[in-house]
Amino acid sequence: MKLQNKWIRAAIPGLLLHCSIGTVYCWSYVSTAIANQIGFSVKTVNWAFSLAIFFLGMSAAFLGNVVEKDIHKSSLIATLCFSLGMAGTGFFVWYGGNQYSATGKGSVLALIGIYVCYGFIMGVGLGTGYLSPVKTLMLWFEDRKGLATGLAVAGFGAAKAIGAPIMEAMQNNPNIGVVKMFYILAIVYFVMMFTGHILLQKPAGWHEPSSSEKKPSIMEVLKTKPLGNYIGIWLMFFLNITCGLAIISYEKQLFLTVGFVAIAGTLGAVSAVFNAGGRLGFSAWADTMNDRNTIYKMIFILSIAFTAIVLMTNGIVNAEGNTFLAIMVVVLIMVVNAGYGGGFSNVPTLLSDHYGMGSISAIHGITLSAWGFAGIAGPQLAAFIIDKFGGATKEFDYHGKMMVVNPQGMQRILIATLILYIVSLVVCLVLVRPTEKALAAKAAKKAAK
């Protein structure tokens, strides 16, 4: 008997795929251990994460049509690439560790291998895995599209809360360590993703056009609205991710800087919950609105307000010994995480409201290129500001490892993110047009007066 249940065929496989690939955001919990083992700086090693996010966006953009035509092929590509990339990362960490122990010098081959495995191969798995369940979820949950996509995409955010403590425990276990951790996780995630791949299926009543049928090109679909409308959606998505990553990439250091050394790991898990909660909450809330773009206005206004408060009080620099300012910095991080997650979960439904479901996977894939570029822009912008405009540094002993923080530099990151959040709000208000549903509701309300 064929299973035709929206939870078994869409929600559960979506969660299995996204809870696996979402562990890419646990990178900050392994980067120091990798850098120490292979003999390179954390800053150099961190390019692996930036490359993973870049190739996530690029693979989603170029393989969106594959996802559109065959979700089983795309979810299998995701499963193989993500698990093989993780196992390959473990191999090159092992190889680099041996070379560093033998020669006292870091192996460039090992570093390149990590870039290729974690950055490129896993990045392709991320892009195809992220896209594969989204359209299927919207088809099964037609009346609550935001809730459905938010549920799966929340799994992407929740993966950090689940994975980070497990990865830290494995690294600190003398019988496992960072290399075996990658091998074990590669097997675990392969099983999870392959199960999701087998279960994932579109509704029986949905008909995808065959290769012989005429289907409008993506550009033809986008031109059904003024092109500035799509440019606006792409830009506000890019800017929101850039701002989010600029802050999230220094999240642990921020917790240490404001005095929460003992509970920095716990606060990291809480921020992941806010990230996941923003994905689910904002998207489910948007289902009740006539125009989903309203959610983005709310996200940007909240981000601007809390960033301005921490800027005006010089909160990151002055937080030491001031509980109120320290809490405000933590609140800002939670707001940014929630808005960052909410920005992700509402993109596919916003696009479907504007351009329909026919080519949504391909259009969503192209839009995820914004994520790829922001994956480099956000962390590198933050690193540049700290390097060029930072002040005196502080050191903290965090679980036996010395971590260096730069309060003044991190405070100045907020100047850049505030400007970008304001630009995002302007784009949201000026370029992104109301949907037909929003215009009809506005006309009906006007007629009723």
Image (cartoon, rainbow, N blue to C red):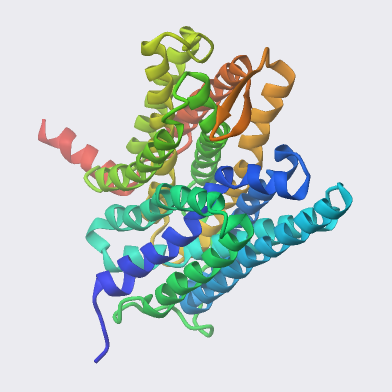
From this viewpoint, is residue 335 visible? Answer: yes
Q: Is residue 86 left or right of residue 341?
A: right
Report the residue at 31% width, 74% height from top. Answer: 9
Figure quadrant of the N terminus: bottom left
Report the residue at 75% width, 41% height from top. Answer: 44
Figure quadrant of the C terminus: top left
Can you say whether 265 is above or below 142 in the image? above
From this viewpoint, is residue 247 visible? Answer: no
Report the residue at 36% width, 46% height from top. Answer: 276
Give coordinates of residue 358: x percent, y percent.
42, 67
Q: Tell me how many marks there are.
A: 0
Report the residue that reaches farthest toward the left. Answer: 448
Name the one closer to the observer, 248 or 371: 248
Can you say whether 316 is above or below 215 in the image? above
Name the one closer to the observer, 13 or 208: 13
Report the residue that reaches farthest toward the bottom. Answer: 1
Name the one closer to the observer, 113 or 299: 113
Q: Quadrant of residue 296?
A: top left
Q: Quadrant of residue 102?
A: bottom right
Q: Quadrant of residue 269?
A: top left
Give coordinates of residue 399: x percent, y percent.
53, 35
Q: Is residue 422 left or right of residue 45?
A: left
Report the residue at 46% width, 12% height from top. Answer: 319
Give coordinates of residue 67: x percent, y percent.
51, 70
